[in-house]
Amino acid sequence: MYQSLRILVLTLISLTLISCSTGVAGLQSYIDAADGYQFLYPNGWVGVDVKQSSQGVDVIFRDIIEESENLSVIVSDVDKEKTLTSLGTPTEVGYYLLKQMNNKEESGREVDLINAESREVEGNTYYNLEYEVTLPNQQKRHNLASIAVSRGKLFTFNLSTVQKRWDKVKDLFTTSVNSFSVY
């Protein structure tokens, strides 16, 4: 009997330690030491080959079940003297980036910026953006982004899902976006 109890206790301790190692329930860690950024992403998501992606796309993950749910990190060059705040306010940068990435005439997408705010983490400024995208087929998507500037690079972390799933994934996506950091 004591042997069974000891095995049960060891199993519970092991499971507790394993769940603590992921940091946040439902999320796992990704670190890109070469480019100097990290974030948490949902369990059950897999990396996608970025060779055929747009220029600057550094990494893409997507849900293996809900394949339209995805995240990406885009790395672009900026003047080494620039800071995120020197590029504008969160709203100004949000509108500028959305206009650049989602030109309605070229893409057929309509983009509405819902929220733009700034956050500070360990001396770095991040702009968190929330927007709704209407695709040419009238499908609505909900996107969250976190933007940072470091070492002459502009980092854009973006998470996206269909609008009908937004309420289900909102907390998880918000935690993921807030976990994005550059170093």
Image (cartoon, grey):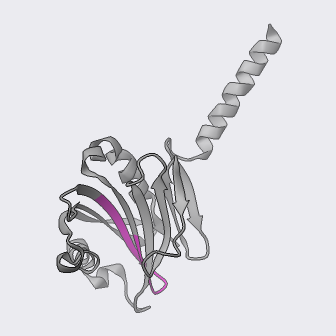
Q: Nearer the viewer, residue 133 or 169?
A: 133
Across and down, in percent, residue 54 comes to: 42, 78
Q: Name the residue located 78 percent from the left edge and 13 percent from the top edge.
A: 4
Q: Quadrant of the N terminus?
A: top right
Across and down, in percent, residue 46 comes to: 54, 55
- The answer to whether residue 102 is above or below residue 46 is below
SS assignment for the magenta stretch, majority: strand
Segment tinted magenta in the rendering: 143-156
Q: Quadrant of residue 6?
A: top right
In the image as oriented, which residue stretches furthest toward the front? 137
Q: Left of 2 or right of it: where is 28?
A: left
Across and down, in percent, residue 35 comes to: 56, 76
Across and down, in percent, residue 178 comes to: 40, 58
Q: Quadrant of residue 30?
A: bottom right
Q: How many marks?
A: 0
Q: Left of 158 or right of it: where is 98?
A: left
Q: Quadrant of residue 8?
A: top right
Q: Is residue 155 magenta?
A: yes
- The answer to whether residue 27 is above or below residue 130 is above
Q: Left of 78 or right of it: where is 35?
A: right
Q: Nearer the viewer, residue 129 or 63?
A: 63
Q: Nearer the viewer, residue 124 or 101?
A: 101
Q: Name the residue located 40 percent from the left edge and 51 percent from the top edge.
A: 175
Q: Is residue 28 magenta?
A: no
In the image as oriented, which residue stretches furthest toward the right? 3
- The answer to whether residue 120 is above or below residue 51 is above
Q: Name the residue located 48 percent from the left edge and 54 percent from the top edge.
A: 41
- The answer to whether residue 86 is above or below residue 160 is below
